Image: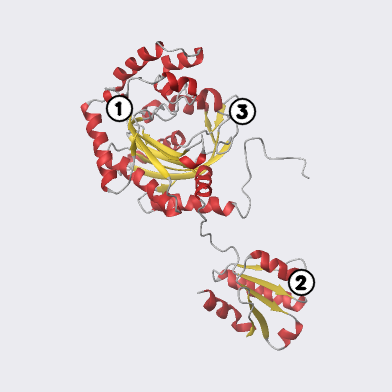
C-alpha cells in the first residue's frame, strides 16, 4: 500500500473508467465547436478578489467553500471555484471584445475546487465543460446555449434530464422585487446567518436547500410577477426559440442558481436519478459581470455542465457509451529477432493511425497472450524464429480464433484492410 492517498473529497481518473470522462467531455464540446465557440484555458488559480466581486461575497462559494491562500509575496489567490469569472477576465485582458466580432464565443474544460462536505455527486475537486458568449444581448444566444447543451446530452444517450428555466429580471425590475422579498423574509423564523444573507442578497435564500427554510418560503413573492415589460418580452422570446427547436423545458419561478452575477435568463439541467445532488449543469445571462470586475459593459450568457455528474446520470440510466478501442492490434514476439521485427511493425501501424501495442518484458507465449486478451485487441500478431525464417507472421483474429500466416512485408496493409 502507498503511504499517500488522494485528499478527502477528490478522486483519481484511471482506466478504464477515465475513458467515460473523456467521452463525456468530447460529447459536450462537439456541438460547441460546430457553433463557432473557440477553446480557452485559464489558470487553476486567480485573484481572490476576482471571485469575491464576480461570484459574490454573500455566496457560500466565496464565504465558505473557496480554497484561498497567500503567496510568499503576499498576494491573495484562490483555486478557481467556477469558470465564468476566469474566462471573462481572460477575454478582457486579451481585449477579445475589441476585435469587432461580438459575441466572443468561448468554451473550456477543466477542474474546479470547492471546500464542502463530500458526498456522491459533490466533490471538492470536480470537472466541468463550460461555454460563454460574451458581448451581446440577444435571446437567440440564450436559446442557442440551452439547445447546444440539450444536444450534447442527447448525443450521449441521456433521456431522463429536465431543463428548468426562469428569468431573474434586470437592474430595473429586480430592485423592486428584492425589496418585496426582503420584507417577506424578515417575517420568517430564520437563523442569524440566513437573515444576514437576506439583507445582502435575498435571492440566495430562495436557493437554500434546507427543508426548514424551504417550508417557510411557501407564499414568498415570485420574481416573474415583478418583471418589467422588457424582461418579460426577452424571456418569452427565449422560451419561443427553445420550443421551436423541439427542446422541452419546465418554468421554475423559484430557480435562482447559486451565483450573484446572473440576470434575466437562468436555467438548470437536473436529473432525478441522482438523489439530492440532482443538478448536472446550469447557467444563465450575466449582463453586469464585466463591469463588476472592472471591464466595460458586455452583456453575456453561458453555462457549465458537470462531467462527474453527467457520468453519474449515465450510470443511473444504464447508458453504456460506445468508447473507442484503445488497442486494435497486439504484437507478441518470441525471441530477439522477432522482437526487433514486430516492434518495427507496431511503430509502422501507429504511424498509419492503427492503435497497436506490444508485449514488453520478454514474456513467454502464454503470458503474452493473456496480455493480448486483456488489451481488448481485435488482432494479435505472433512471430517466432521459424515464422521469420519463412518470411511470415501469424495473424490471429481474437474474436473468431482463426489464425493465418501473412507475409512480414504485407502484415501492415493486411491489418489496415481488415480494420477498415
Q: Label for residue 66?
A: none
User: Sequence-wise, which precedes: disc 2 or disc 1?
Assistant: 1
Foreground label between 1 and 3: 1
User: Sequence-wise, which precedes: disc 2 or disc 3?
Assistant: 3
Q: Mark 3 falls on what kind of element? A: loop
Foreground label between 2 and 1: 2
- Where residue 397 appears, as percent x and y from the top left, is 62, 76
What is the tally of numbered marks visible in this picture?
3
Q: Residue at x 53, y 45 (%)?
A: 312
Spatial CA span between label 2 and label 1: 69 Å
Mark 2 highlights which residue? 366
Pick out the residue farthest to the bottom: 390
Pick out the residue farthest to the top: 187
Q: Mark 1 falls on what kind of element? A: loop
- Where residue 28 appears, as percent x and y from the top left, is 44, 49
Mark 1 highlights which residue? 169
From where the camera sits, is residue 170 visible? no
Q: Are marks 2 and 3 in contact (CB under 8 Å)?
A: no
Q: Mark 2 falls on what kind of element? A: helix
From where the camera sits, is residue 252 visible? yes
Mark 3 highlights which residue? 71
User: Sequence-wise, which precedes: disc 1 or disc 3?
Assistant: 3
- Where residue 74 appears, as percent x and y from the top left, is 60, 24
Q: Report which quarter residue 357 is drawn in.
A: bottom right
| Residue 356 as seen in the image, left or right of residue 89 | right
- Where residue 258 appears, as percent x and y from the top left, is 44, 29
| Residue 48 as seen in the image, left or right of residue 154 | right
Amino acid at each position: 500500500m502507498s503511504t499517500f492517498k488522494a485528499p478527502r473529497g477528490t478522486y483519481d481518473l484511471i482506466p478504464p473508467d477515465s475513458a467515460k470522462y473523456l467521452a463525456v467531455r468530447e460529447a459536450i464540446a462537439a456541438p460547441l465547436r460546430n457553433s463557432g465557440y473557440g477553446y480557452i484555458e485559464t489558470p487553476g488559480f486567480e485573484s481572490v478578489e476576482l471571485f469575491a466581486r464576480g461570484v459574490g461575497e454573500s455566496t457560500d462559494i466565496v464565504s465558505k467553500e473557496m480554497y484561498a491562500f497567500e503567496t510568499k509575496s503576499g498576494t491573495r489567490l484562490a483555486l478557481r471555484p467556477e469558470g465564468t469569472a476566469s474566462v471573462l477576465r481572460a477575454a478582457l485582458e486579451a481585449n477579445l471584445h475589441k476585435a469587432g466580432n461580438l459575441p466572443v464565443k468561448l468554451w473550456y474544460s477543466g477542474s474546479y475546487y470547492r471546500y464542502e462536505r463530500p458526498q456522491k455527486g459533490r466533490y471538492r475537486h470536480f470537472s466541468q465543460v463550460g461555454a460563454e458568449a460574451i458581448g451581446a444581448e440577444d435571446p437567440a444566444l440564450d436559446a442557442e446555449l440551452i439547445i447546444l447543451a440539450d444536444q450534447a446530452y442527447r448525443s450521449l444517450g441521456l433521456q431522463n434530464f429536465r431543463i428548468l428555466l426562469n428569468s431573474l429580471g434586470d437592474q430595473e425590475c429586480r430592485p423592486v422585487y428584492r425589496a418585496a422579498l426582503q420584507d417577506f423574509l424578515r417575517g420568517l423564523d430564520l437563523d442569524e446567518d440566513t437573515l444576514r444573507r437576506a439583507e445582502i442578497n435575498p435571492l440566495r435564500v430562495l436557493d437554500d436547500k434546507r427543508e426548514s427554510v424551504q417550508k417557510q418560503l411557501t407564499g414568498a413573492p415570485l420574481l416573474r410577477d415583478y418583471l418589467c415589460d422588457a424582461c418579460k418580452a426577452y424571456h418569452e422570446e427565449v422560451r419561443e426559440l427553445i420550443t421551436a427547436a423541439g427542446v422541452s423545458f419546465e418554468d421554475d419561478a423559484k430557480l435562482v442558481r447559486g451565483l450573484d452575477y446572473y440576470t434575466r435568463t437562468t436555467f438548470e439541467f437536473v436529473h432525478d436519478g441522482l438523489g439530492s445532488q440532482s443538478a448536472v449543469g446550469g447557467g444563465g445571462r450575466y449582463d453586469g459581470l464585466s463591469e463588476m470586475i472592472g471591464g466595460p459593459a458586455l452583456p453575456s450568457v453561458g453555462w457549465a455542465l458537470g462531467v462527474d455528474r453527467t457520468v453519474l446520470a449515465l450510470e443511473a440510466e444504464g447508458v453504456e457509451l460506445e468508447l473507442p478501442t484503445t488497442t486494435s492490434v497486439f504484437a507478441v514476439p518470441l525471441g530477439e529477432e522477432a522482437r526487433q521485427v514486430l516492434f518495427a511493425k507496431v511503430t509502422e501501424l501507429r504511424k498509419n493511425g492503427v492503435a497497436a501495442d506490444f508485449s514488453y518484458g520478454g514474456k513467454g507465449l502464454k503470458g503474452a497472450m493473456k496480455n493480448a486478451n486483456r488489451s481488448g485487441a481485435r488482432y494479435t500478431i505472433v512471430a517466432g524464429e521459424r515464422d521469420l525464417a519463412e518470411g511470415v507472421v501469424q495473424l490471429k483474429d481474437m474474436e473468431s480464433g482463426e489464425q493465418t500466416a501473412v507475409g512480414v512485408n504485407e502484415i501492415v496493409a493486411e491489418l489496415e484492410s481488415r480494420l477498415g
